[in-house]
Amino acid sequence: MARVIAILKALGLAYRRDQKSLVAIVGNNFFLVTALLLQDAGGFIYLMIGVVLLFPLSTDPLRKIPASRLALWPLDGRERRLLRIASPWVNPVSWLIAGLAVWAIRGKVTFGLWAAVAGLFVAAFLLSDLPFAPRRAIWLHIPQFPGRWNQLIRKNLREILCTLDFYCALLLSVSVAICRVAKVPLPPEAFLAITVLVVLALSSYAACLFGLDGPGGLARYRLLPLWGWEILAAKDVAFLVVAIPLTLPLAPLAAIAAALVALALGHGPTVNRPRPQSRWRFSTGGGVVTGLVQAAFMAMAATSVFFSSSLYLLPCIAAWAGSTWYFGRRLETRADV
Amino acid sequence: MISCRNLTRRFGDFTAVDRLSLEVARGAICAFLGPNGAGKSTTVKMLTGLLPPSSGSVTVDGLDVTRNLLELKRRIGVLPEDLGLFDDLTVDEHLLLTGSVYGLDKRETRTRTGQLLHALSLEHGRHTFAGACSHGMRKKTAFAMALLPNPRVLFLDEPFEAIDPVTSKIMRDLLAAIAQRGVTVFLTSHILSVVEQIASQVVMIRKGKIVWDSPPADLPQSLEQHYFDLVEAPVVEELNWLGSSQS
C-alpha cells in the first residue's frame, strides 16, 4: 500500500506541474479578447474553448509514468489493480464529473449535460490510453511544397496542427461552413467578425513561432546556411497555409490581411522573447500587451479590407515583409534562438 | 584549416575556455579530449559559429568565423552536442531538408540520402519521426546530416557515444576515408580506444586550457594513461553498502 501511495503522490505532483501549462490559456489572444470583449455574450466561444480543453485535461494520469518504468517497479498484482483504480482520481476532472453527477441527481444540472461532459472525458481518457503505434503516421501525409523550404514548411505545419489553437479555429470555421450549407441567414458583418475570431484563435502561435522546435531544433536553425528572414518566412508560409483554408467559407481576403498583421506583430516576441510551448495546449502568445495590440491591428486590417478596398492588403504585405526582414536580421545575431 | 588564437569564452565570472590556441591541418583528424565540463562543447560551438567568443580569433577554412558565418555554414558539417533535430521531421526528411538547404539537386540528394541511410543502417527507420527515434538513431541521423553536403571541415561532438559497434566501425572508416581526401575532422569523444584508432592529432583540455597537443605517436605512454595523468585521474570511492545484498 505504501508503494501505491508513494506512486500516487508522485503522479499528483507531475500532474499538477503539467496542469500549469494549461495556464497558457490566460495569455492566449483568443481567450483574452473573448473574455474582455464578449464577456457574458461569449457563451458559445467559452463552450468551444471548454470542449477543446477537455481533451488534454482528460488524459490518463498513469501515462505520465513510462511503461518500462512501471513494469520494472516491484508491485504485486493487487497493488497494480489498486493503482489502476486510484490513479484517475489524481485528475481533477474526475472530481468535477463526480460533483456534476451529484448535482444531476439533485436536479441542478440536467443528466444530458452530465452525460455529455462525462462521455467526452471517458472518450478522451480511453483514446489517450490506446497504444496507437502509428499515431504520428498521419503527419507523414502533409503535402509537399516547392522550393528549398519544403521540409521546414512541412515541419512547421505539423507543429501548428499540434496546438489547440488550430482546433479552436477549425471548430469556428466548421460551424460557419455548416451555417452556410444549411442556408442559415447571417449578416455580412458576422462573416467579418468570425473571420477575425478564426485568425485571432491562431494568432497567439504567431507570437511564439519557435515554441515547439525545442532546443535541438533551435540549434539546427543556427547551423543551417539560411538567412534569418528565410527561417521566419518558412514559419509564416505554414501559418498562412493553415489560416487561408480555414477562412475560405468566411472572408478570405480580410483573413489574409489579419494573418499578415498577426505575423508582422508576432515576429518581435518570437525572436526577442522566445517562449517554449507544449503540444496539445493553447499557445501562450507573446504576452497580454502583444496580444491586445495584435488583436486591435488585426481587426483594423480585416475591417479595412472587408468594407473599403482590397488595396488595404498592400500595407499589410509591406508591414509583414519589413518585419520579416528586420527580425530575420535580429534572429541571425541571437545566440539562443 | 582550423586556427584559433587566444580563444576565450566567459559566462559571467566563469571562464569556460581560457586563451586556447590551436592549429589543425587540412586532412587531419583532431581528437579533442577532456572530462565533462572541461570546455570541449563550448570550443566546438565557438569554432562553428554557434557561440561568439568573448575574445580571441578563429578561422576555419580561411574564413573568420565571426565575420563570414553564412559562408562558413555552407562549408562545414556539424554534429552538435544536442544533435539539432526537429521532432516533427522524419529521418528521411531531415536529410532531404539538408540537401535542399545546401543547394544539392533533388536527384543527388536522394542518391546520397539512400547511400547514407544504407551505410548507417538507418533504412528501416527512415520514415520514423526524430522525436520517436532511439538516441542511437538520432545520432546517426545527425551524423548523416553532417556528411550529406560533403563538407570541407567536419565538427563532431561525441559522435561514437550510444552507437552500436558495427555502425561505429563504419563511421570510423568513413571518417578515415574522407580525411584522406582532404576533409578536416575535429571531434570530441570520451571513448579513448576509438580515438586511438583514428586520430592524427590529440588535444587534451582541462578546465578550459589545453594541456596536451601532439600526434598520437608522440604520446609518452598509452593514451588512456596519459589522459589519467594529465587530465583526470579516476576517483576511488569505497561504496561498502553495494557489497550488502540486504541494502
Image: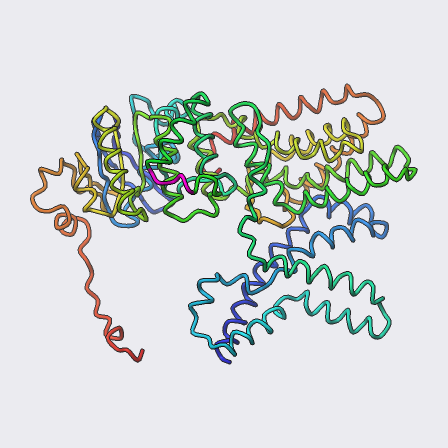
Which image quadrant for residue A99?
bottom right
How far across and how far down the image is residue B12, in percent? Answer: 38, 45
A323 relative to B37, above or below: above
**Front-lying residue, A199 or B46:** A199
How far across and how far down the image is residue B105, in percent? Answer: 45, 20
x 29%, y 42%: residue: B167
In the image, the segment drawn in magenta is B120-124
Q: How is the image coloured?
A: rainbow
How far across and how far down the image is residue A93, in percent? Answer: 68, 65
Magenta portion: prevailing SS class: loop
Q: Verify whether residue A47 appears in magenta.
A: no
Residue B235 vs residue A165: left or right? left
x 77%, y 71%: residue: A101
Q: Verify whether residue B122 appears in magenta.
A: yes
**Front-lying residue, A158 or B82:** A158
Q: Residue furthest left?
A: B220
B87 relative to B228, above or below: above
How far across and how far down the image is residue B43, in percent? Answer: 31, 38
x 63%, y 45%: residue: A163
